[in-house]
Amino acid sequence: MTKKSPSTINKAAPGVLIALLLAVWQGLSSLGVVPKYMLPSPADVVKAFFADFPLLVSHSKTTLAEAALGLSCAIFLAFVVAFFMDRYSLLRRAVYPLLVVSQTVPTVAIAPLLILWLGYGIAPKVVLIVITCFFPMAIGLLEGFSSADPDTINLMRAMGSTQNQIFRYVKFPSALRQFFASLKIAASYSVVGAVISEWLGGMEGLGVYMTRVKKSYSFDKMFAVIFLISAISLLLMKAIDLLQKKATPWDNLRQQEQEL
């Protein structure tokens, strides 16, 4: 009789836990412990999802377009800011506290101001996503640049390497792990940020759809959107994980050696 390997059990554990939670949820709803108008059953949520599937796909395209544009701008801005903060210590000491302070302001409080300043188009939504996603990536990159091996840097300096060469061959590769870790967080934030911005204004998007079904008290459709947003975020994180394996093959070799 063969035993399952620990890796197989670890991979199956999240799915088993989710299935168990859904079964308990369905049981509570079927037995009437929780009224359906307060908490619709998973079966009702699935029915609502497929009933409005074409509409959800249409709204998802708008939300994903906003999230992709905002995340792309946040990645570019994070690289630029982290690069100059790593290169100039004075700039780092001046800007770093401002980055921390920028995260203390709730995004729900910023969104109405952005709509007031930029209108109801895509601009305020992209700006809100950039504000939400920029911080974790900038800090992750900055910490990655700082964690580069000092002995390797000193060796390259002794060999006459320029700062740009040191950055390209030492600091940038050493920061990729932190960058991808923060990118996973930022990718999920981008979708949530787009939905939050759509709550306050817009004609299309999952946030607009949520606002409409909430006003009609269709909570089964509300949960369908929540599950869809969660699924999109998980798919984005999985795609980034695959991209990380392609971009950092040395980490894959190190993990394989540790498993052996």
Image (spheres, rainbow, N blue to C red):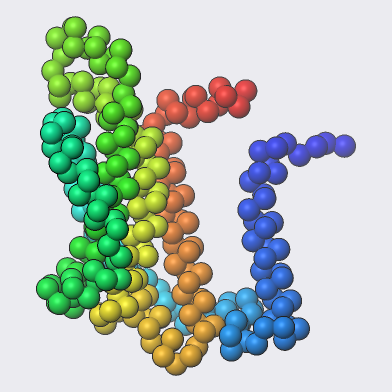
Quadrant of the image for the N terminus? top right
The quarter of the rendered structure image containing the C terminus is top right
Q: Is residue 65 visible?
A: no
Farthest residue to the top: give it.
158
Q: Where is residue 23 drawn, in percent x and y?
A: 71, 69
Q: Quadrant of residue 42?
A: bottom right
Dividing the picture into quadrants, the one containing residue 196 is: bottom left
Q: Position of residue 155 (x, y in %)?
A: 25, 9
Q: Is residue 77 above or below residue 64?
A: above
| Above or below, 6 relative to 58 | above
Where is residue 180? Give x, y as percent. 37, 41
Is 255 on the left or on the right of 29, as rendered? left
Residue 72 vs 19, above or below: the answer is above
Q: Residue, x 59% and y 89% (percent of image)?
A: 37
Residue at x-position 25% and y-position 22%:
169
Of residues 180 and 34, which is closer to you in this image?
Answer: 34
Q: How many marks?
A: 0
Q: Residue at x 80, y 37 (%)?
A: 3
Q: At which x and y percent is residue 4?
A: 76, 39
